[in-house]
Amino acid sequence: MKYLRKIYLFLLDTVQTFLIAAAIFLVIYVFLFRPFEVKGDSMFPNFLDQEYVLTNIVVLDFQNPRLGDVIVFKAPPEPNKDYIKRVIGTPGDTVRLSNGNVYLNGKLLNENKFLKPDVKTYGGQFLPNDKTITVPPNDYFVMGDNRVYSSDSRDWGFVGRSAIIGESFFVYWPLNKMGFIKNPY
């Protein structure tokens, strides 16, 4: 009888521990951080296909996305999918693509901290070359780091503030790429 009681107490402790851990995980997942998988090569070389990032979903309750932030959002062309891109223009900014370069508010945008100097950025259907657009209130202009292979704001337009899920801040898989995501600006 003594052994049965010990087994019962052990099982009870194990179930309680599991339920507490599950509750903590659920609170973190629902209210604070969410994992996302990078799919495709649109953010190469900074983020690789099948890499996993943690995204802070509460930070946007206190601040708006800033230039250079890497965000996850509901994809305008496919709202059932999540995209990960870099913020290039915030509300009120002007964006222009000319001669393979990005101009923000009339000045050449220095992207050397996250792109190789020889990377060229050309226009798309929404923002063709040599056209200037102004980012409306509550909208953002985003682009992938792999400019040639990225479907982004150049093709389908702005990302609304309400479509943004959160700001990615940490790569956790694969282990050799583990680390914090820094804003280059």
Image: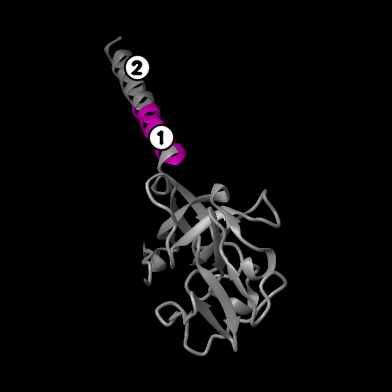
Residue 152 seen: no
Q: What residue is shown at x 63% (from left), y 79% (from top)?
A: 148
Mark 2 → mark 1, Cα distance in angstroms: 29 Å
Q: Which mark is residue 8?
A: 2
Which residues fall within the magenta stretch?
A: 17-30
User: Disc 2 marks which amino acid?
Assistant: Tyr
Sequence-earlier tag: 2 or 1: 2
Left or right for 63, reference 155: left
Dominant SS in magenta: helix
Q: Which mark is residue 27?
A: 1
Circle 1 sits in a helix, a strand or a loop, which is it?
helix
Residue 115 seen: yes
User: Disc 1 marks which amino acid?
Assistant: Val
* Numbered disc total: 2
Q: What residue is shown at x 56% (from left), y 70% (from top)?
A: 144
Q: Quadrant of the C terminus?
A: bottom left
Going by the picture, which residue comes out furthest to the right? Answer: 125
Q: Nearer the viewer, mark 2 or mark 1?
A: 1
185 is higher (above) or lower (below) than 101: above
Residue 82 placement: quadrant: bottom right
86 is higher (above) or lower (below) than 82: below
